[in-house]
Amino acid sequence: MGQTTYQGVPGILRPFKEYIEKKSLPAGSEIVFYGVPGTCTPFVELLCFAIRSLSLTCIFVPYTGEEKAHKLTMKPDVGFQASEAYPPKSPAVLVIMGGLAMPNMPVTADDVASVMKKWNGAGAIGICFMHMFEKAGWLDKMHFDLLIDADISVDVTSD
């Protein structure tokens, strides 16, 4: 597996979009994001915005609760937002967000691996910050076709 280093938010979005574009998915294909409500959703909305020109169906699943999934819809002058309930039917790509691997989350690596096995044949992308999948030992339990692992550096200035 080759590794390339990118910078900033485009470094997360560009390889994600390139992976999705290379799949040449038919219009309406489901891109299903599994993540932590509130923490992962802003990143998922940003990822959906990156592929907005591809006419795909983006779905957010809280944790692994597919029965609680919502479609993400482009709202003019806002960006992608959760809309109607929309459980996945036939995912083309699964996107596993690293927030799931954080301590004290109500899911385990085995839970997520089971979801990935259920949708065997779908592409698999892992997106995390600060090596979270590696630190939590999840990379031993699942395979990602594409792993985007970003570092966060924060400078704070105040009066």
Image (cartoon, rainbow, N blue to C red):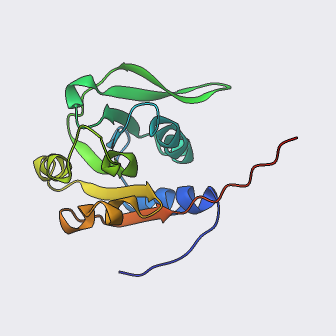
Residue farthest toward the bottom in the current orientation of the protein: 2
Give how far across and how far down residue 140 sits, in percent.
20, 68
The N terminus is located in which quarter? bottom left
Given residues 108 and 18, the one toward you in this image is 108
Give how far across and how far down residue 129 sits, in percent.
47, 57
Position of 76 with respect to 159 (left or right) is left
Residue farthest toward the front in the current orientation of the protein: 159
Residue farthest toward the top in the current orientation of the protein: 84
At a point 25% along the width and 61% down the height, the residue shown is 138
Above-or-below relation of 159 to 16: above
Give how far across and how far down residue 19 sits, in percent.
42, 62
At a point 17% along the width and 56% down the height, the residue shown is 121
At a point 49% along the width and 41% down the height, the residue shown is 48
Given residues 127 and 2, the one toward you in this image is 127
Above-or-below relation of 132 to 29: below
Position of 67 with respect to 104 (left or right) is left
At a point 33% along the width and 60% down the height, the residue shown is 133
Above-or-below relation of 142 to 100: below
Position of 39 with respect to 25 (left or right) is right
**Image mark count:** 0
Q: Quadrant of residue 29?
A: top left
Give how far across and how far down residue 66 sits, in percent.
22, 31
The C terminus is located in which quarter? top right
